[in-house]
């Protein structure tokens, strides 16, 4: 049974299906306001927990799997909610931001800058992110628009690093 798009998913919904748990960012998407920001914060915190235990190559492989899994869990959860890109679905912020963090210098200032840039690009959705957001209403489109935001973030970080160093 689909929940209304006006209603935030509940803890019961989160725990009803492993796909919902993943799509809602292990609960970070249940935040009462700015769930995308909370999902990105969850990504930042979780990245710094598991980063010391894996090589860059292993993380890239895991992120690729997480991205592909995201297409499926977001599609499944979006259908259950009745909105393919409900605000509580934040896995699309988490996985691309993990990639950004992997490619960002390992300092608080660089990571905070990456966080701010990613949020700006995720919210403003410059093309082609806007195309995916407006026209591809499924798990692939939801994941793709945030991957574009990650690309813009990495481009800006690279330009900053070039200019500053």
Image (tube, rainbow, N blue to C red):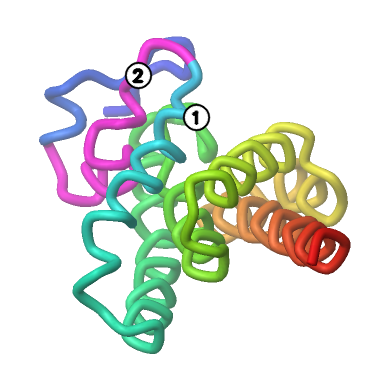
Which residue is found at the position 12% from the left and 36% from the top?
A: 16
113 in the magenta segment: no
Q: Main secondary structure of the magenta part?
A: helix
Q: Quadrant of residue 121?
A: top right
Residue 134 x %, y %: 76, 41
What secondary structure is marked by label 2? loop
| Mark toward the start of the polypeptide (1 vs 2) | 2
What secondary structure is marked by label 1? helix
26 in the magenta segment: yes
The image shows a total of numbered marks equal to: 2
Which residue is found at the position 70% from the left and 32% from the top?
A: 123
Residue 18 x %, y %: 16, 50
Q: Is residue 2 above or below residue 139?
A: above
Other-residue count near label 1 (Cα within 10 Å), few / some / many at <14 / 14–19 / ≥20: many
Which quadrant holds the C terminus?
A: bottom right
Q: Are marks 1 and 2 in contact (CB under 8 Å)?
A: yes
Q: Label 1, label 2: how many angstroms apart (C-alpha)?
A: 9 Å
Q: Which residues are magenta?
A: 16-33
Other-residue count near label 2 (Cα within 10 Å), few / some / many at <14 / 14–19 / ≥20: some
Residue 138 x %, y %: 56, 52
Which residue is found at the position 35% from the left and 49% from the top?
A: 76
Which quadrant holds the N terminus?
A: top left
Q: Nearer the viewer, residue 119 or 132?
A: 119
Q: Which residue is mark 2?
A: 31
Q: Which residue is mark 1?
A: 37
């Amino acid at each position: 049974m689909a929940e209304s798009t006006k209603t935030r998913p509940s803890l019961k919904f989160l725990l009803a299906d492993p796909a919902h748990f993943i799509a809602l960012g292990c609960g970070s998407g249940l935040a009462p306001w700015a769930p995308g920001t909370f999902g990105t914060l969850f990504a930042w915190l979780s990245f710094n927990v598991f980063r010391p235990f894996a090589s860059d190559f292993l993380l890239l492989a895991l992120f690729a799997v997480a991205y592909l899994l995201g297409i499926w869990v977001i599609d499944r959860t979006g259908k259950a909610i009745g909105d393919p890109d409900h605000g509580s679905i934040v896995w699309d912020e988490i996985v691309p931001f993990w990639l950004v963090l992997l490619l960002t210098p390992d300092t608080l200032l660089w990571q905070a800058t990456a966080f701010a840039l990613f949020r700006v690009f995720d919210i403003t959705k410059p093309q082609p992110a806007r195309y995916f957001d407006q026209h591809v209403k499924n798990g692939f489109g939801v994941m793709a628009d945030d991957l574009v935001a990650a690309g813009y973030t990495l481009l800006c970080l690279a330009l900053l690093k070039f200019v500053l160093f």
